[in-house]
């Protein structure tokens, strides 16, 4: 029998990481699983672990803790003996408590948001409002202020405080309203000059998140997304434009900066949106299905511009080039002096990748002979299936000094896994599979 070489799993395939599509497509040139090596511009590269932030605990109070960042000051919302503590971050692992709320519910709705005005900071949520000049003593109120309502989400938009999902008594506003302040103030009282005001955005359902992107505010809700654009004529206010007819999976299933937001939709699909307001569908529904959607939160690493997606049990990393899974179950990413620190739990670190199912473009029986890669000292696992049966692990073989593993198994379909108990120095760029066509009914076509 003639021996053939399958070379479709090359660097262009591997560097794109886990396949984005839910369908189990045979011979699809992407990976089913990828662990502790991430997608780079030119090739797969080893995962760069987050440094340990400090001694605030692990993930026993998921989805806490939450990093609340500004340009000149940052805070950490964390749980201490059942109480919500808002602490100012002084240095790596060094915190100063600024506010304490007794006996809060440990859920997504209790996580606060921050509005950063450079010299002035506002932290707001169901716990109350923390506000003040940077570097000074911060004021804390468990209730709304006279001129500022309480909401579950907030941000700064060019000097105006934007608040969403109002939970205090404010001009009849509720969970489907957005309120904005005067410029350069947190006074949100509507006035004759119309600079401060409020808007019903019931198109989005319950408001989950308000975030600035470019020169506008995106309002993410339970059933939709709208954009608020500043208008000057005929009078200062905000105009509204619908962006999407679906909402977020939950209020923390989103992260990003002024140029991009990555989020998980309520439909179980990942999206990314940029300053052009175009919502780009990334897919990865099969990944979302492995997560507990109500517990899923997304954290952004502004240093590497990467996103951590975790429910406290598994964690995926999305770069601009693709998706992989990592061993650090990340609740918060805290950049300090150019280094990304994290608060996380850890699984066992190791490297593995698994191909999608392969039948070498013919449905007859084939004999897989040999697997070759450029990963030194790896273990090669081969799973097989024939006639629609269940997948079974046939054999695990340690590759020799030439990075080849002899398998010798006959089946219709195959999946190949490379794995190693360390990801240091692992830069996979190809997998070659040699096989023979055992079913000779199409041999004439094969030789031609």
Image (spheres, rainbow, N blue to C red):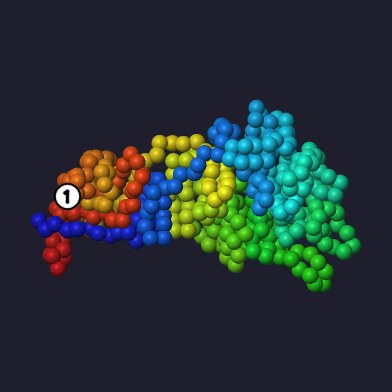
Residue that sits furthest to the right in the current view: 192
Q: Quadrant of the C terminus?
A: bottom left
Which residue position is annotated with label 1?
Answer: 369
Q: Nearer the viewer, residue 56 or 17?
A: 56
Residue shown at 57% from the left, 33% from the top: 55
- Residue 58 lies in quadrant: top right
Please determine whether, in this image, residue 134 is positioned above or below residue 85: below
- Which residue is located at x 33 percent, y 39 percent? 421
Left or right of residue 224: residue 37: left
Q: Residues within 10 Å of mark 1 (few under 14, many from 20)?
A: some
Q: Is residue 184 left or right of residue 406?
A: right
- SS assignment at label 1: strand
Residue nearest the viewer, comparing 121 with 213: 121
The residue that appears at 71% across and 54% down in the rendered structure is 118
Image quadrant in which you'd find residue 258? bottom right
Q: Position of residue 357 (x, y in %)?
A: 31, 51
Give percent across and percent down for residue 205.
Answer: 68, 52
Q: Nearer the viewer, residue 175 or 219?
A: 219
Q: Is residue 378 visible?
A: yes
The quarter in which the N terminus is drawn is: bottom left
Q: Position of residue 183 (x, y in %)?
A: 80, 60
Looking at the image, which residue is at 47% across and 55% down? 319
Question: Looking at the image, which residue sits at the far bottom?
Answer: 233
Tell which residue pokes out farthest to the left in this image.
1
Q: Count numbered badges in the picture.
A: 1
Determine if residue 165 is in view. Answer: no
- Check the image and report above or below for 69 versus 63: below
Give the percent coordinates (x, y) of residue 241.
Answer: 68, 65
């Amino acid at each position: 029998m003639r021996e053939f070489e399958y070379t479709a799993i090359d660097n262009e395939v591997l560097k794109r990481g886990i396949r984005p599509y839910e369908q189990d497509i045979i011979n699809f040139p992407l990976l089913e699983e990828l662990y502790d090596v991430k997608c780079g511009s030119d090739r797969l590269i080893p995962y760069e672990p987050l440094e340990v932030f400090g001694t605030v605990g692990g993930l026993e109070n998921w989805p806490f803790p939450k990093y609340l960042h500004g340009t000149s000051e940052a805070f950490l919302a964390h749980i201490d003996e059942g109480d919500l503590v808002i602490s100012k971050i002084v240095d790596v692992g060094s915190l100063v408590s600024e506010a304490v709320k007794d006996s809060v519910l440990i859920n997504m709705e209790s996580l606060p948001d921050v509005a950063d005005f450079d010299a002035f900071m506002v932290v707001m949520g169901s716990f109350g409002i923390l506000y003040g000049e940077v570097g000074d003593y911060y004021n804390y109120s468990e209730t709304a202020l006279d001129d500022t309502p309480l909401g579950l989400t907030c941000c700064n938009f060019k000097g105006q405080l934007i608040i969403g999902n109002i939970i205090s008594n404010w001009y009849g506003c509720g969970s489907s309203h957005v309120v904005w302040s005067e410029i350069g103030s947190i006074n949100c009282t509507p006035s004759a000059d119309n600079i401060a005001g409020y808007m019903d955005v019931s198109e989005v359902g319950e408001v989950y998140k308000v975030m600035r992107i470019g020169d506008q505010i995106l309002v993410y809700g339970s059933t939709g997304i709208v954009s608020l654009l500043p208008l000057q004529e005929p009078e200062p206010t905000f105009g509204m434009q619908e962006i999407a007819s679906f909402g977020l999976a939950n209020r923390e299933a989103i992260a990003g900066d002024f140029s991009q937001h990555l989020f998980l939709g309520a439909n179980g699909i990942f999206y990314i949106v940029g300053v052009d307001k175009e919502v780009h569908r990334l897919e990865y529904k099969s990944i979302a299905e492995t997560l507990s959607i109500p517990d899923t939160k997304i954290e952004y690493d502004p240093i590497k511009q990467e996103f951590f997606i975790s429910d406290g049990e598994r964690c995926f990393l999305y770069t601009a080039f693709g998706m992989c899974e990592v061993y650090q179950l990340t609740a918060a990413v805290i950049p300090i002096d150019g280094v990304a620190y994290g608060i996380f739990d850890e699984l066992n670190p190791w490297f593995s990748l698994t191909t999608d199912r392969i039948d070498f473009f013919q449905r007859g029986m084939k004999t897989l002979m040999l697997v070759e890669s450029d990963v030194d000292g790896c273990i090669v696992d081969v799973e097989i299936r024939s006639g629609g049966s269940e997948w079974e692990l046939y054999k695990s073989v340690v590759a020799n000094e030439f990075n080849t593993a002899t398998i010798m198994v006959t089946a219709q379909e195959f999946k190949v896994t490379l794995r190693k108990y360390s990801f240091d120095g692992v830069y996979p760029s190809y997998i070659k599979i040699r096989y023979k066509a055992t079913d000779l009914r199409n041999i004439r076509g094969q030789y031609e």
